[in-house]
Amino acid sequence: MADARPALDTPPAPPSGWEEYAFSVLVIVVVTAASLILPESYYLSVGLIYLLAIILLCQRVGRGPVLLAGVLGAFAWEYIFIPPHFSFAINSLQDALLFGTYFVVSLVVGQLTAQIRAQAQNARLREQHVTALLRLTHALAEAKTLDEAVFAALRQMDELFGAQTSLVLADGAHKTLIPHVASSYALDEKERTAAEEAFRTQQRAGRLTDNLPDRMGHYLPLVRDNKTIGVLGIKAPNSTLTPAQQNLLEAFAQQLAMIIEREYLRAASEREKLLAESEKLHRTLLDSVSHELRTPLAIINASTDSLAGADSNLRGQLVNEIRTAVHRLNRLVGNLLDQTRLESGTLKPRLDWCDAGDIVNAAVESTRDALAGHPLAIAVPEDMPPVRADFALTEHVLANLLLNAANHTPPATPVLLTAGIEPGGQRMFFTVADRGPGFSPAMRGRLFKKFIQDDAASTAGLGLGLSIVRGFVVAQGGEVVASENPGGGALITVYLPHPPPKAAAHAAC
Amino acid sequence: MTKSHSTRLLVVDDEVQIRRLLRLALEAENYEVHEAATGQLALSEAAGVHPDGVVLDLGLPDLDGKEVLRRLREWSQVPVLVLTVRDGEEDKIAALDSGADDYLTKPFSRRELLARLRAVLRRTQPSSEETIVRFSDVEIDFAARIVRRAGAEVKLTAKEYDLLRYLAQHRGRVVTHQQILRELWGANAEDSTHYLRVYMTHLRQKLEPNPRAPKFLQTESGVGYRLVES
């Protein structure tokens, strides 16, 4: 079938069966018999009665039987009722004219009425199709994902056409066709070639077309913006599609194409948004890193410049500046590396029994210069048992917490670091408390995310510290909690699981 | 402080600035310094020069530092101090297991470098057969198996003494947990580290002026312990 589709308003109706013809004949016979009762002079009225019968017949039978009824009725009327009766002869010219026009009128009326009926049927069919399309658009609008939409569309089509459908979508490069899981039949090699043909030529292919008509399925390309985004296949047990059905199919295909395109556009826009956000984050990171790296380098540079002409007193000071700057740089590099390790997922904590006091001392030692000016109190119980932790990770955790305390509090404010076993003995804890401004309620939620810096705080560091703390603690099976230090300030508690050792803690030896 | 005259050192690092700074620091202590910039050169220098000690960077361009160590150890027991940028414990332990005597993480201080170098060099010196070791106000008499603090005897359990003795024999150098466990128990049972922590705590309580902030019996994070001398 060529692509040119006949107009919807003249659909070929199925041909009438012999019952309809027989029925027409019967009606004429009945009308004739009934009219014989009337007086002979009423022959004009009889003509109109025949006409009426023909009009009523149109409601029931097709064109052919109506035509037969028209002819039969005309001749019956002429033979039986127009004088002379029971003769084909006509006496007057008027009667002849009467018969002639009547003949034509009955045929025309028959055909017109039949046409009206056909159009009414057609309108009903169109209404059905419009309803089907509306149902489809509703289903598509309600579907939350593309897959849901495709499922809805294909299932509706299966129902509406009494057929099986399949959908293949083009991949990103518009080269390969990927079958969609909602398809109700799978494409074997032969069917696939028809689908690919439709894809390539942007014309229908397969059954009912000129292109590969031996295939079982009928394939429509889904084209948007001159690009084929997929192919819709339909495999029907009955062999043809009426033009109305073809139109409906085309409409469905267009809806489907539209929704697929919409989804692709939406996905592309999402990706762009994500890319833009990630770029923004990278820019922030670069700016921050640049600042954090360059500042200590600037200090080292300036100090070395002044070293040459410095007296021994100044030299000592400059050397201290350089040393502090070096430590700061080293810490920064360490933090960046830690964050990278956390994000790459390669972090594997090595849990072993550790002396909590040792971890505390190591952390304090590594932040000694940053903590200068803050009185530091350490409280680790005398009888603190060994704890199960990754020494290096936990040391970093405490160091970062101490740095945070030093950087976010006014100079000379105290910092308290404690360790202990939680009542119940299931967990051990470390706490770091300060007397600074504490955490605003708004901050507390975002506290452990990357690159968060409290606006009111000094911007030392990249804001990686707490995210590293959380990452390292969680990796060891623990938990970090931020809260208010009673009396003012921030309190961070790190919990780690405290399993019982397999044997007694004290061996007799 | 044992300052050996013309003790010969081989310094191996691919960074010319590091080699320069190391040479400056070491020559100021009267060491004789030879340099090598790659692993292959290091091995051939070592064979030719027969140094008394080697400072070896692990991040060499041609051979993995551990490989250089292994090959060196095939024919030499020279004391080796490794330098590394990686602060991960696995790398340090791996280096020690491959035959290094101690390590330094970059950036390191001059003081640490010299102290650890002295400690590793002592291993091959005749005086390593000493019977008395002193640190702080503590004296360990290996022959008599007595430990004194400020002249008074300190009671240690057998395991505590073994631990102290082992650390003292390797003083200045790091000893890994594995090495200690093997020495004390000959095995590597998981909970032995638990005991190890407890014994260490006891030793510190008995011997350190401030047990909470130990100055001599120091933890080497995640790697082991080191008895620091001064």
Image (cartoon, coloured by chain):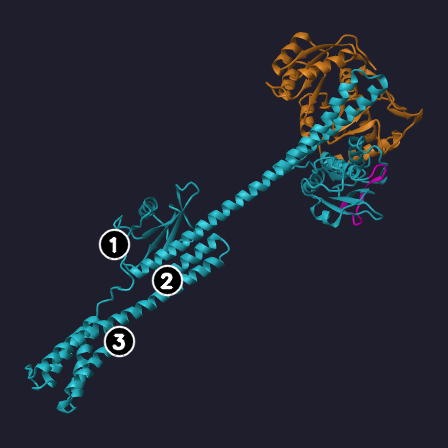
Chain colours: A cyan, B orange
Q: Are marks 3 and 1 in contact (CB under 8 Å)?
A: no
Location of mark 1 (residue): A1
Instruction: Note whether residue B217 is visible.
Output: yes
Relative to A244, residue A82 above or below: below
Q: Is residue A52 left or right of residue A250?
A: left
Sooner in the amino-acid sequence: mark 1 or mark 2: 1
Question: Which range of residues does the magenta coloring cover?
Answer: A410-428
Expressed as whole percent of the image width and height from the top left, the position of residue A308 reads 78, 15
Relative to A500, residue A67 above or below: below
Location of mark 3 (residue): A59
Expressed as whole percent of the image width and height from the top left, the position of residue A358 reads 79, 34
Pointers 3 and 1 within a single chain? yes
Q: What secondary structure is marked by label 2? A: helix
Relative to B226, residue B123 above or below: above
Location of mark 2 (residue): A160
Expressed as whole percent of the image width and height from the top left, the position of residue A146 reads 47, 52
